[in-house]
Image (tube, rainbow, N blue to C red):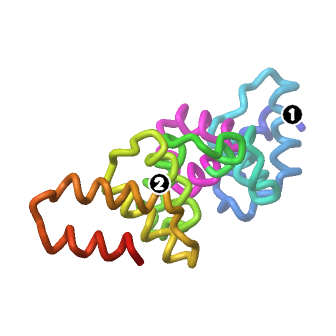
Amino acid sequence: MNEAGLPARISAIRGLPNEMNSQDELQALFAEMSAQGMPIPADLEERSLRLILQQRSDDQQVLQRLFAVLQVQEKDIPPELEERAIRLILEDRPNDQNVLQRLFQLLQLQGKQIPIALEERSLRLIVKDRPEDQVALQRLCVVLQTQGKSVPASIEEQARHLTQKAWPDDPDLQRRLSAARRA
């Protein structure tokens, strides 16, 4: 195709909704543009990458490239795309508390519920790093019980110890903790 037709094709593709583009059409256009020494416009590369992700939603390289292309265009990364990328990172780094916390933020931002198994994983990491974190310890007990799992004796004892330490002068609480310990 001649150079005069290329701008018209680019404009025509830009005028179509994303779902009307085909990956083959975009790749042919990119090849032609490259052959003529033209750079590939970021908005068209974005379209192509989104089409690829429809077929290969777990392709981390494509996600990373899409993030870079969005940043070049000064566009925000949609939370659902970042969520996909974070979930892929978690497969390689399942105990990375920072990655888990970012996933929780993204889920909340999208109005999604945090999966209880992920919350348990996060809480176990927090309690391991900060065994004196009473709130995390108590929440871990609740999360385990909610899933029908038994609370390990060491975690239960640590929770009791921290509760007693926090409220040493509460006789009712001390009585209930003693009764729970005997049970």
User: Does the rendering let one see residue 44?
Assistant: no
Tell me what residue is drawn at x 70 percent, y 52 percent: 50
Q: Which residues are magenta?
A: 63-86
Give the percent coordinates (x, y) of residue 96. Answer: 57, 40
> Residue 123, labelled with which disc?
2
Query: Disc 1 and disc 2: Cα gap in Å?
Result: 53 Å
Whether 161 is drawn above or below 61: the answer is below
Task: Tell whether 83 sits left or right of 51.
Answer: left
- Specify few, some or many for label 1: CA neighbours under 10 Å numbering under 14, 14-19, or 20 or more: some
Quarter of the image with the C terminus in it: bottom left
Give the percent coordinates (x, y) of residue 138. Answer: 36, 62
Residue 135 lies in quadrant: bottom left
Prevailing secondary structure of the magenta residues? helix
Residue 168 lies in quadrant: bottom left
Mark 1 or mark 2, earlier in chain:
1
Tell me what residue is drawn at x 75 percent, y 38 percent: 61
Tell me what residue is drawn at x 44 percent, y 66 percent: 141
- Specify few, some or many for label 2: CA neighbours under 10 Å numbering under 14, 14-19, or 20 or more: many
Amino acid found under the numbered disc labelled 2: Leu
Indicate whether residue 68 is drawn in magenta. yes
Determine contact: label 1, label 2, CB under 8 Å: no
